[in-house]
Amino acid sequence: MIQVRPLRSSDVAQVLRINAASRPAVAELDQPEIARLLALPNQHLVALNGESRIVAYALAFSRDAAYDGEEFLLFRSAISEPFVYVDQVAVLQEARGSGVGRALYEELQHAAAQQGAYVLCCEINVTPPNPESMAFHTKMGFEIVGTLAARDGRSVELRRKLLLR
């Protein structure tokens, strides 16, 4: 059984281990950066397996957060209505295909709708390639709305999903 709950400061070491195991599919996090992201208003989540071990995390921000990520700022300039931006999702290899990613997104969709946001936004690496994430997000109903050559050398697809009102 999968349990999803808000990310706590006591989860940071486990989140950093998952992040390290998931690169280059996600950007590298370190202790100072995750502390900075936790200090901002957020919808960060973790997913636990049946043994209560964290096997995945999601970092997400509302449109009005003081977050400075390049992709987030691009979405904020293009979308005037409330949205939730999913900055990172990482799932341990052993938990992939178990519904953990879907459970994280379902909770993010629920939280977004509760705050009046009916759009989820994210980016997916094209370079370096992340075909698993592309397939997952397509299956979840995310559509491509653009591309970006990021300052850090990555090329990404910008995607959004409109939520039911």
Image (cartoon, grey):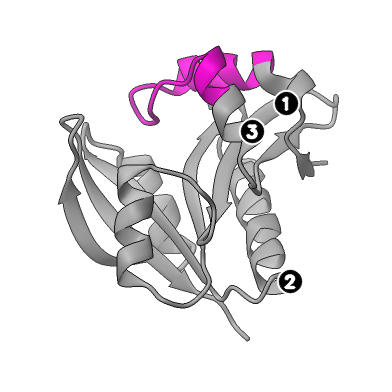
Mark 3: few/some/many CA within 10 Å (<14, 14-19, 20+): some
Give the foreground label among 2 and 1: 2
Where residue 5 is drawn, which disc sits there? Answer: none
Q: Which residue is drawn at 38% across and 28% down?
A: 27
Dot 2 and dot 3 residues touching (CB under 8 Å)? no
- Residue 155 appears left or right of 109: left
The answer to whether residue 142 shows anywhere in this view is no
Verify CB contact (< 8 Å) between mark 2 and mark 1.
Answer: no
Q: Which amino acid does label 3 sit on?
A: Leu
In depth, the one of 123 and 2 nearer the eye is: 123
Residue at mark 1 to residue at mark 3: CA–CA distance: 17 Å
Q: In the visual, does 70 lie left or right of 110?
A: left
Is the residue 134 above or below the residue 18 in the image? Answer: below
- According to the image, label 2 marks what residue? 114
What segment is highlighted magenta in the picture?
Answer: 13-34
Instruction: Write the residue at 41% across / 21% down.
Output: 28
Q: Is residue 119 above or below residue 97?
A: below
User: The N terminus is located in which quarter?
Assistant: top right
The overriding secondary structure of the stretch rendered in magenta is helix
The part of the image, by quadrant, that contains residue 3 is top right
Residue pointed to by mark 3: 38
Sequence-wise, which precedes: disc 2 or disc 3?
A: 3
Under mark 2, the amino acid is Gln
